[in-house]
Amino acid sequence: MPKKPRRPVYNTVVRTTTKVGHEVRKTIGGAIVAAFAFIIALVWQDVIRSTVDGLIAYLGLTGGGYVRLLAALITTLIAVGGIWYFSRWSEKQGQ
């Protein structure tokens, strides 16, 4: 029975093309996920801003620079808390 001739160059090209296609899809998928995350962040920005503004009004704080600094600190704490919570949540999902 005759052996089939090996086509190492062809096989290498097919494997490489498949890997490149997979990497391209993965990169595009990551970019699309990042775009959706950006949209979500823009929506939540309004919610967080109105919450912080309401808290500042409730506390009766006035003054430009200090109030903005306080708002930035509160927003940062909320964001860090959200990142921490969802990072732990995603680790549990991956187990």
Image (cartoon, helix red, strand yellow):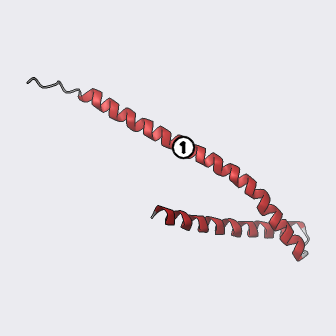
Q: Residue at x 80, y 70 (%)?
A: 70
Residue 92 in sight in this render: yes
Residue under circle 1? 29
The image shows a total of numbered marks equal to 1
Quadrant housing the C terminus: bottom left
Q: Which type of secondary structure does the marked residue at label 1 adopt?
A: helix
Q: Residue at x 59, y 43 (%)?
A: 32
Which image quadrant for residue 19? top left
The amino acid beneath tag 1 is: Gly
Q: Is residue 4 left or right of residue 37?
A: left
Q: Residue at x 28, y 30 (%)?
A: 11
Picture coordinates of residue 84, whole percent (x, y): 60, 68
Picture coordinates of residue 39, whole percent (x, y): 70, 49
Picture coordinates of residue 46, whole percent (x, y): 79, 57
Q: Is residue 84 left or right of residue 8?
A: right
Picture coordinates of residue 42, whole percent (x, y): 73, 52
